Image (spheres, helix red, strand yellow):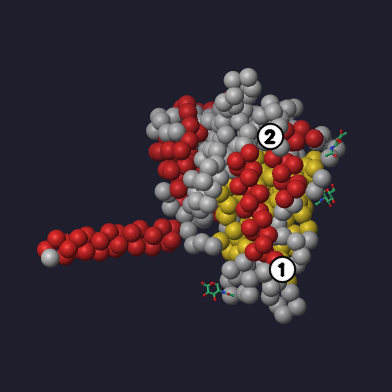
Amino acid sequence: MKLSFSLSFFYFLLLAYICSGSASAKSFSALPLRFRKNGHFKILQVADMHYANGKTTPCEDVLPNQMATCSDLNTTAFINRLIQAENPDLIVFTGDNIFGSDATDAGKSLNFAFAPAVESKVPWAAVLGNHDQESDLSREGLMKHIVSMKYTVAQVNPSEADVIDGFGNYNVEIGGVQGSRVENKSLLNLYFLDSGDYSTVPSIRGYGWIKPSQQFWFQQTSIKLKNAYIKNPEAQKGSAPGLAYFHIPLPEYASFDSTNSTGVNGEHAISSASINSGFFSTLLKAGDVKAVFTGHDHLNDFCGNLTGIHLCYAGGFGYHAYGKAGWDRRARVVLATLKKTKNNGWGAVKSIRTWKRLDNQYLTAIDPQVLWTN
Ligand SMILES: *[C@@H]1O[C@H](CO)[C@@H](O)[C@H](O)[C@H]1NC(C)=O
Ligand SMILES: *[C@@H]1O[C@H](CO)[C@@H](O)[C@H](O)[C@H]1NC(C)=O
Ligand SMILES: *[C@@H]1O[C@H](CO)[C@@H](O)[C@H](O)[C@H]1NC(C)=O
Ligand SMILES: *[C@@H]1O[C@H](CO)[C@@H](O)[C@H](O)[C@H]1NC(C)=O
């Protein structure tokens, strides 16, 4: 009797603990994310912060007279200014968030690096690059730390995939305007993938790539989302548009020159994996993803249309990352806009546009372009 009483009391405590845990997790970032009342959803992409230890960490590739006053804190200041100026609905950090080999405590560096998102309470997502794991946390450890932070929508990996390569593969659905008929339907699908760090196949040198297990998960997710979309009363034929975010560019990024892309290839090169694992053709076949966004090559910030899918860089963001002195650090903004319906409601996504912002006095917006229209 005594035993069963204390046992049930124990279960009561356990239940109370679990409930309080999930309740507080929900209050972190109000899921689902939704389009605003004005029919807009805006994403700020931050690539390659290369954060280390804060104010003691010097800058790379700034003008000689800027050296003495420049540190990781300039990276923080740039994000804060962008959040003020753009008021994004989501911030996406596309890897090399921290520069592991200079970060003495990876957890602290992550906290520092993502602090502007956490403090502004803007929901945020992150994937890993090839440098994040060079400090004292593994790639799994980094993603576990990230998902424990406030206001993040990141996941270590999808719960429905039994076996998947990497850490930080997940999708996020963007619901319709609150109060509309499609408030619980995803009108915009975001995919986040771990493009790895380096090849683990001895005979293949160079960077990592998106593996078959991840592509299989992407295909299954895309089909599931399409099936849900068809049941959407306001939706048109086809699928909701999708956007994919990861770190290392696909080999197909080499398909452009200055005549058919917007922005620059300042590296005169694309540092993708040395083999092609076929993710671009997987995306083409799925048909829903309209644009891919990566980082990795800090001096490349172009965006080009390859057979209906835009392949875009954000350009280098962080001050403790290689760059080019006198060439402003930058970020990419994406804005999706819904179609107005006759009865003054909102329908499916009508257009997806992008531009970049430079870290100068005016946060100059450059290179506006249309990625997709419906
Ligand atoms: C870095 O921040 C300091 C302090 O606000 C500022 O004086 C300096 O101009 C900034 N450097 C760059 C390269 O933006
Ligand atoms: C959306 O989901 C919420 C919570 O489950 C529910 O209260 C609301 O009625 C749903 N909206 C529509 C349009 O179905
Ligand atoms: C861009 O133009 C170059 C020639 O200037 C061509 O070789 C390349 O195939 C074009 N790329 C696309 C995606 O059209
Ligand atoms: C991208 O290219 C495809 C054909 O390859 C074309 O149908 C589509 O209109 C282009 N998209 C934009 C936004 O220009």
Image vertical order of residue 109 relative to residue 284, above or below: above
Image vertical order of residue 30 relative to residue 287, above or below: below
Measuring from the top left, give residue 362's x and y in whole percent: 64, 47
Which quadrant of the view contains residue 22? Answer: bottom left
Is disc 1 surrounded by few (<14), some (14 to 19) or many (20+) residues within 10 Å? some
Depth check, front residue: 106 or 223 = 223
Whether residue 77 appears in this view of the structure is: no
- According to the picture, the residue beneath numbered tag 2 turns out to be 277
**Some atom of ligand 3 lies within 8 Å of the CB belonging to the residue at label 2:** no
Depth check, front residue: 290 or 169 = 169
What amino acid is labelled 1 in the image? Ala
Q: Nearer the viewer, mark 1 or mark 2?
A: 2
Measuring from the top left, give residue 211's x and y in whole percent: 62, 37
Which residue is at a point 57% across and 26% down the rendered structure image? 200
314 left or right of 164? right
Measuring from the top left, give residue 35's x and y in whole percent: 62, 64
Quarter of the picture containing the N terminus is: bottom left
Q: CA distance from mark 1 to mark 2?
A: 33 Å
Q: In this figure, what is the number of numbered marks? A: 2
Quarter of the picture containing the C terminus is: bottom right
- Tags 1 and 2 in contact by the CB under 8 Å rule? no
Which residue is at a point 56% across and 45% down the rendered structure image? 169
Q: Name the outermost residue toward the front.
A: 1
Whichever of callouts 1 and 2 sits on the residue coming sooner in the sequence is 1
**Some atom of ligand 2 lies within 8 Å of the CB belonging to the residue at label 1:** no
What amino acid is labelled 2 in the image? Ser
Which quadrant of the view contains residue 295? Answer: top right
Depth check, front residue: 372 or 10 = 10
Measuring from the top left, give residue 146's x and y in whole percent: 45, 45
Image vertical order of residue 25 relative to residue 181, above or below: above
Which residue is at a point 49% across and 62% down the rendered structure image? 30
- According to the picture, the residue beneath numbered tag 1 turns out to be 235
